[in-house]
Image: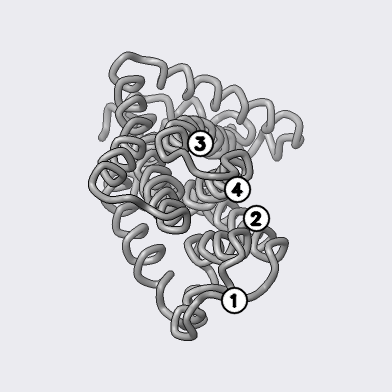
Amino acid sequence: MTDANQLAVDASEREGPSPPGHWLASAWAVAAFQLDRLMTRPRLAMALVGALFPPAVMFAAIRTAPLDRNMAVVMIYALIPEALCVLGLLVTMCPVVADELERGTWIHVAIRPGGRRSLLLGTFAAAVLWTSSVAVTGLLLTLFIAQLTQPIGLAAMFIALIVLSCIGRAALFALPAVILPKRALIASVGVAFLVEYMAGFLPAVVNQVTVSLRLRSLLVEWMGWRQQLPVEMMLFVDMYPASIQIIAVVILVMVLLTVACFILNRRQFPPSAEN
């Protein structure tokens, strides 16, 4: 361990644990800082492209052939809570730890009480707020293009799915961000593919710890599709009520963030001059 890192660790240990109010305020300060960094023209242009992608696909689909309400809902689900939310989190959650390392701010974060935890939780909050805002904008535009019946009910349902998707996937991507900060984006893509889109469709115990299973189950229940699903499709949804699905996502988020903070607090990072 370098002298600088040893001093940082010693200072952090001397400070002791910080009170909850302190690190919550610090996490919110980090979130505000990260959100401010996202308010640049390139990032805003990227957000606009992301928000316009689902309505553009829906417009093209409607022009090609008429869509019934159920098919349109499935398309919106695949485009927004699944695709757009995951892509948004990949660019807002994953690279931040490595970026902080390269900019040399980690040594300053390390000597603050709860600094690492505040950095991770603040980045998590910023990624969720930014991505969900882009996704909700895309949702409203898509519903306007689709002209579906009961749009307010659909909007409320999809906003709930967007929020759950963002908090669940952001917590999932926190693990590769702290385990492999230099390869966080690549590792997170692998995690999304293997965990969410492969394990999530396995009719086994492993899919119980995926966000995708919970989102599909909520969609099926809230749309009233359970009685219409073929028997073989019942393997890919969970039959517990919506409250259980939401609680399962919250528990999964808490476990993932706790593990990520535990790993982060015990890692050693050299200052930028030695990277």
Residue 109 lies left or right of residue 153; in this view the side is left
Q: How many marks?
A: 4
In this view of the protein, which residue sits in the foreground, 203 or 100? Answer: 203
Which of the marked residues, 2 or 1, is nearer the chain's N terminus?
A: 1
Gap in Å between the C-alphas at discs 2 and 1?
Answer: 27 Å
Dot 1, how many residues are within 10 Å of its Cα: few (below 14), some (14-19), or many (20+)? few
Q: Is residue 195 above or below residue 149?
A: below
Q: Which residue is mark 3?
A: 132
Residue 112 lies left or right of residue 24; in this view the side is left
Residue 131 percent coordinates (x, y): 46, 35
Residue drawn where x is 41% and y is 41% of the image:
89
Q: Quadrant of the C terminus?
A: top left
Residue 64 percent coordinates (x, y): 23, 47
Residue drawn where x is 60% and y is 44% of the image:
150
Label 2 or label 4, whichever lies nearer to me, is 4
The image quarter containing residue 12 is top right
Which of the marked residues, 4 or 3, is nearer the chain's N terminus?
A: 3
Q: Which residue is mark 2?
A: 250
Gap in Å between the C-alphas at discs 4 and 3?
Answer: 14 Å
Q: Is residue 98 above or below residue 29?
A: below
Query: Which mark, residue 157?
Result: 4
Q: Which residue is mark 1?
A: 227
Mark 2: amino acid: Val
In this view of the protein, which residue sits in the foreground, 13 or 72? Answer: 72
Dot 3: element: helix
Which of the marked residues, 3 or 1, is nearer the chain's N terminus?
A: 3
The image quarter containing residue 105 is top left
Label 4 or label 3, whichever lies nearer to me, is 4
